[in-house]
Image (spheres, rainbow, N blue to C red):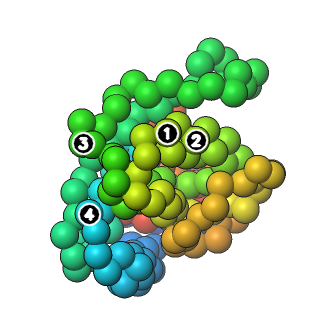
């Protein structure tokens, strides 16, 4: 258990098991991803679509490392009904204002667990006839069963732990942590 004053001040006294990625490690990897993305899209319109809420910190750091024109919009997706009894449908609570047709769409997600959310979202977005459609995920737990969404850009291959911080929450807490921790 990590009980340093810096961590406890931020969590309200709750210890975390360990820091898995510290702020410097994340920043260095985000810069690399930004370079990869810049090189991967030499031309065309690029629309970065952040999946709320988990991607908000990652997305805001990432777009500042991309050295070509981009547009930024967001998506809020929700599965119908009880998440444990997956209905196979997805509903958009917020639909991007921006037109998707003909543009390169890069969907930005915090973490891939089962990959089900993204799998459905990709099918829905493909129907909007974008020029191309790809995923950038900060973390991949590599637990997703087939059919697995194809991840074009991945920050880290994450351990199969419950991670919080840098946008990731547990019951809406811990999103503000500047590092990613194993809550345990
Ligand atoms: P999936 O559809 O099972 O891949 O679910 C992915 C979503 O579950 C992510 O966007 C997160 O909101 C949430 N999630 C999955 N694993 C974690 C975790 O370790 N910490 C926090 N949220 C998680
Ligand atoms: Mg969440």
Cβ atoms under marks 3 and 1 closer than 8 Å: no
Label 1 residue near ligand 1, CB within 8 Å: no
The residue labelled by disc 2 is: 123
Mark 2 or mark 4: which comes first in sequence? Answer: 4
Mark 4 or mark 3: which comes first in sequence? Answer: 4
Mark 2 or mark 3: which comes first in sequence? Answer: 3
Seen in the picture, residue 69 relative to 99 is either above or below; the reply is below
Of residues 20 and 65, the one drawn nearer to the viewer in this rendering = 65
Few, some or many residues within 10 Å of mark 2 (<14, 14–19, 20+):
few
Answer yes or no: is residue 117 visible. Answer: no
Instruction: Spot the residue most to the left.
Output: 69
Residue at x-position 62% and y-position 15%: 81
Residue at x-position 22% and y-position 79%: 67
Cβ atoms under marks 2 and 3 closer than 8 Å: no
Percent position of residue 125, x then y: 47, 42
Q: Secondary structure at mark 4?
A: loop
Few, some or many residues within 10 Å of mark 3 (<14, 14–19, 20+):
few
The residue labelled by disc 3 is: 98
Quadrant for the N terminus, please: bottom right
Of residues 84 and 78, the one drawn nearer to the viewer in this rendering = 78
Q: Is residue 98 left or right of residue 111?
A: left
Few, some or many residues within 10 Å of mark 1 (<14, 14–19, 20+):
few
Q: CA distance from mark 2 to mark 4?
A: 21 Å
The residue labelled by disc 1 is: 127
């Amino acid at each position: 258990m990590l009980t340093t004053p810096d961590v406890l001040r931020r969590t309200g006294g709750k210890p975390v098991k360990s820091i898995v990625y510290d702020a410097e490690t994340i920043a260095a990897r985000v810069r690399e991803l930004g370079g990869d993305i810049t090189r991967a899209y030499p031309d065309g319109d690029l629309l970065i679509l952040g999946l709320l809420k988990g991607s908000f910190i990652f997305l805001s750091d990432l777009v500042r490392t991309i050295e070509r024109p981009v547009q930024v919009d967001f998506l809020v997706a929700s599965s119908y009904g009880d998440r444990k009894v997956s209905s196979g449908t997805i509903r958009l609570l917020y639909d991007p204002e921006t037109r998707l047709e003909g543009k390169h769409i890069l969907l930005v997600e915090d973490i891939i667990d089962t990959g089900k959310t993204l799998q459905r979202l990709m099918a829905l977005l493909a129907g909007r006839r974008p020029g191309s459609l790809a995923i950038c995920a900060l973390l991949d737990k590599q637990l997703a069963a087939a059919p697995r969404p194809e991840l074009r850009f991945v920050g880290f291959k994450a351990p199969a732990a419950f991670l919080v911080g840098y946008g990731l929450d547990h019951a809406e807490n811990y999103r503000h942590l500047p590092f990613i921790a194993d809550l345990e």
